[in-house]
Amino acid sequence: MILSSLAEKPIELGLAGKVFLSVVIVVLGCFVVGYVIVKLLGLSIKLYLPPIMFANTGNMGLPLVLFAFGDNGFSIGILYMVSMTIIHYTLGILILNFDKSPFEVLKLPLVYSAILGILLSVSGWKMPLSAERAVTLLGEASIPTMIFALGYKLSELRLSHVKISLLFGGLRIALGFTLGILTVTLFGLNGVTSDTIILQSAMPPAVFNFVLAGKYNQDSHIVASIIMAGTLISVFTTPLIIAWLI
């Protein structure tokens, strides 16, 4: 999906850079505000900070972007998702447990597919027709697969510590939405690009926060509860945000 979306049409490197910087600003803004709130409440940084910082821009964000803004928005959404995942696998793992996996990002296939897709786009090269058709068909199948995977993973999560979960789940959405507006204003972005960045920034906590919490021996049940709370809140906030953007 990443390879076919990026290679399909020419990418303006300046725009890609602005998308990446937008993600950096959103994540760092969430880091600063989240760090202060977590410290004031006397909670664990490793446990409560990542769900505020890292949004579900993949299996929730991309289908919504495609639905709301079509193929043009989807290409921007891919750039946003790849940027978010790279930061998640660097800064996110640094927060959780840097000493055990400093080069985790190098194990991600999406990093290499993004690099190859961008190279194909800016160079004008084309994949062989058979490879292009195969990649495109698999890419088109990935969206419904991601939606199914999200539903399956959410079915395993449970909502506990209700007040604190709702606070941090809601904080991820509110901070992301606010910082998304700030970044597109800062870079003078508008149209589908602006709308896509704002929508992706306002997604609930990423399910992968739960996976990494378990991998690095944190209390994954609390993280799962925050993810569930944020996703439930997004059922109400996301339609309002899309309606406002459109």
Image: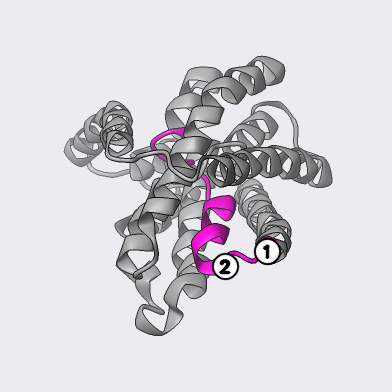
Q: Is residue 208 magenta?
A: no
Q: Amino acid at mark 1?
A: Tyr
Decide: marks 2, 1 in contact (CB < 8 A)?
A: yes
In this rendering, would 81 be left or right of 246? left
x, y (%) of residue 62?
A: 45, 33
Res 151 quadrant in image: top left
- Judging by the rendered image, the residue that carries numbered circle 2 is 45
Mark 2 or mark 1, which has the lower sequence index? 1
- The magenta segment is 41-60
**Viewer-closest of 230 and 165:** 165
| Rendered residue at 35%/45% (across/down) | 3
Instruction: Name above or below for residue 38 compared with residue 60.
Output: below
The residue tagged 1 is 35
Residue at 82% from the left image edge and 46% from the top image edge: 186
**Label 1 crowd (10 A; few <14 / some 14-19 / many >=20):** many
Q: Residue at x 36, y 71 (%)?
A: 104
Residue 150 visible in image: yes
Q: How far across and how far down the image is residue 217, in percent?
A: 34, 70
- Residue neighbourhood size for the residue with mark 2, other residues' Cα within 10 Å, grouped as few (<14), some (14–19), many (≥20): some
For the residue labelled by badge 1, is the local secondary structure a helix, a strand or a loop? helix
The verdict on residue 47 being magenta is yes
Please say which color scheme the image uses: one colour
Residue 236 percent coordinates (x, y): 57, 20
